[in-house]
Amino acid sequence: MTAAKISGLPNDKVHVHTTFLGCGLGRRGDTGFVTEAVIASKSVGKPVKVVWSREEDMKYDLYRAATCQRIEAGLDSQGHLTGWSHKVSCSSLLRQLNRQE
């Protein structure tokens, strides 16, 4: 939706090629990189690929707040899981994602 809004194209004409990878540290929910790619693409008149260096990523990107997690498990005599407790305390990711731009 962000790309369609910036480009002026209808949603069905916008194609985003997602790279599936782990550990985005909560940042994949933000649309800043989409904004950069669409503006760059409009400027050059063709598709672009935006890649940040590790240094740029660490310096300029957004991060989720730290979490505190307590995990407890119970095992039987054969080492099979018999119980699991996982408690998490953290700020809301949805609050950050739903902010007004």
Image (cartoon, rainbow, N blue to C red):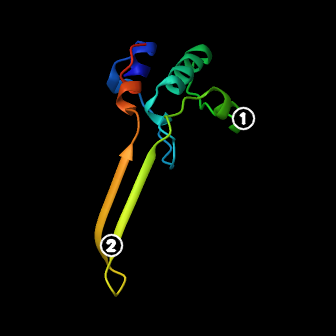
The quadrant of the image that shows the N terminus is: top left
Give the spatial CA distance, label 1 vs label 2: 42 Å
Residue at 44%, 21% (x, y): give it: 3
Query: 40 and 88: which one is in front?
Result: 88
The x and y percentages for residue 33 are 54, 27
The x and y percentages for residue 54 are 69, 38
Residue holding disc 2:
74
Residue at 55%, 27% (x, y): give it: 47
Q: Is residue 65 left or right of residue 89?
A: right
Disc sitting over residue 11 in the figure? none
Query: 93 and 78: which one is in front?
Result: 78
Question: Mark 1 vs mark 2: which is more N-terminal?
Answer: 1
> In this picture, is 20 found above or below 55?
below
Residue holding disc 1:
55
Considering the numbered disc 1 on the image, is that residue within a helix, a strand or a loop? Answer: helix
Q: Amino acid at mark 1?
A: Glu
The x and y percentages for residue 12 are 33, 26
Q: Amino acid at mark 2?
A: Gly
Considering the numbered disc 2 on the image, is that residue within a helix, a strand or a loop? Answer: strand
**Residue furthest left in the image:** 82
> In this picture, is 81 found above or below 42?
below
Asked whether disc 1 touches disc 2, contact meaning CB atoms under 8 Å apart, the reply is no
Q: Of tags 1 and 2, which is closer to the observer?
A: 2
> In this picture, is 39 found above or below 87?
above
